[in-house]
Image (cartoon, helix red, strand yellow):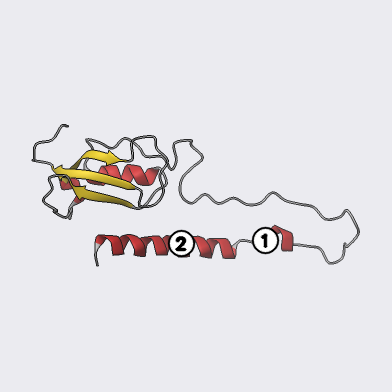
Amino acid sequence: MGRRATYVATAAAVVAACLLVFLTLDDPAADTDDDDNSPGSETTQAPIELNLFGGDDPEDRRMPDVVCMDLQEAQNEIQDHGVFLSGSTDASGEGRRQIIDSNWIVVEQKPAAGSPIGEADAELFVVKDDEPNPC
């Protein structure tokens, strides 16, 4: 299974889990007392908000500065900002795949740090740890 296929499978699993959680929540609007149908007896509740992709920090879903991190640390940092799918490209131009992420270092990132990002928007350009780099 290729890297993109793995991303798609992971995203599908996350969506399925979210859907399962959403469908199992009680609907506050459906909870009515059949014995009390008098006008004005109905109360309203605030909707339940689920935030499965990060906290309420303003930095969530924004691209962190990951240049000079190893690829695994960079991916973890992006996930900490609420985005679970990111890509990586061999910056040497040789087209090598990143099999062991911790053996690669990020030398460039797109988009720039602080930019809003969604799934698969982050692209990290990497070289092997022992290769010349600006870090």
The residue positioned 28% from the left and 42% from the top of the image is 74
Q: Secondary structure at mark 2?
A: helix
- 59 or 33, nearer to the observer: 59
Residue 135: quadrant of the picture: top left
Residue 48 place in picture, x, y as percent? 63, 52
Q: Residues within 10 Å of mark 1 (few under 14, many from 20)?
A: few
Q: Say above or below: 54 vs 42.
A: above
* Amino acid type, residue under disc 1 in the picture: Asp
Q: Is residue 15 left or right of residue 112?
A: right
The residue positioned 46% from the left and 45% from the top of the image is 54
- 75 or 132, nearer to the observer: 132
Q: Say above or below: 102 vs 20.
A: above
Residue denoted by label 1: 27
Residue 80 place in picture, x, y as percent? 38, 43
Q: Quadrant of the N terminus?
A: bottom left
Residue 14 place in picture, x, y as percent? 43, 60
| Distance (Cα) linking label 2 and label 1 | 20 Å
Of badges 2 and 1, the one in the foreground is 2
Q: Secondary structure at mark 1?
A: loop
Residue 45 place in picture, x, y as percent? 72, 51
Q: Identify the residue at the far right of this view.
A: 38
The residue positioned 46% from the left and 65% from the top of the image is 16
* Amino acid type, residue under disc 2 in the picture: Val
Residue 15, which numbered label?
A: 2
